[in-house]
Amino acid sequence: VPPTTYSFPFTTAAPPAARPPLPTLADVARSAGSEIVSLVEMPADDQQIVAGSVLYDSTALPARFPGAVALAIGLSLSGKRLSAKVRELSGAGYVAIVYKSNGSSDKALRAAAREAGIALFRASDSVPWNQVAEIMDAAVVPHRQSGRTLVDIRPGDLFDLANTVAAQAGGAVAIAAP
């Protein structure tokens, strides 16, 4: 028996010219919530545009990514180069850093972020980084696409699932039943 295929046209996203703008730091801070990722420092300019999040390797120079949020996995909060790393991120266009304190003081990081004009979000130590990344992406994606996220879908609603995925992917979606 051949699989059944359901095709759904891409209907929920607005045309490129009418798509909503990218979110600001203030928008992302509101969307991210406070239980898993909490805002710790916000620069005076909370209207900076956020383009997405990226994993940050503190042992390498950051890639240029204007509007990026750095997911700073394993960032040492007591390193001698901490201030220099924050300045490097700011110089590469990053607007925020997400970090975990793991029981350490974040006083030096907070000072460096204030000096560089970069926002800080502290992630709960008990939440895996992949979930933190999903939360930060979800705080940005709705502004870029249809305003719907996968969390908004009613369980079992294939039409809603297909339309939401189509909006996020920017094209048509087909769901095949085996």
Image: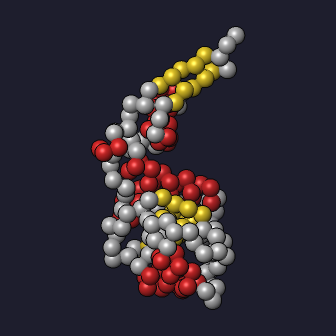
Rendered-image quadrant of the N terminus: top right
The residue located at (44%, 54%) in the rendering is 140
Instruction: Identify whether 9 is placed above or below 27.
Output: above
- For the question of whether residue 35 can be seen, the reply is no
Asked where in the image residue 31 lies, by quadrant, the reply is: bottom left
Position of residue 146 measured from the top left corner of the image (x, y, whole percent) = 39, 41
Instruction: Identify whether 10 is placed above or below 67.
Output: above
Instruction: Name the one closer to the observer, 173 or 138.
Output: 173
Position of residue 148 measured from the top left corner of the image (x, y, whole percent) = 42, 41
The residue located at (58%, 84%) in the rendering is 82
Asked where in the image residue 28 lies, by quadrant, the reply is: bottom left
Rendered-image quadrant of the C terminus: top right
Query: Farthest bottom residue?
Result: 80
The residue located at (47%, 25%) in the rendering is 8
How has the structure been colored for display?
secondary structure
Position of residue 54 measured from the top left corner of the image (x, y, whole percent) = 56, 62
Position of residue 170 measured from the top left corner of the image (x, y, whole percent) = 46, 39
Query: Farthest top residue?
Result: 1
Instruction: Name the one closer to the observer, 75 or 123.
Output: 75
The residue located at (54%, 26%) in the rendering is 174
Query: Farthest left residue?
Result: 18
Q: Is 89 on the left or on the right of 146, as rendered?
A: right
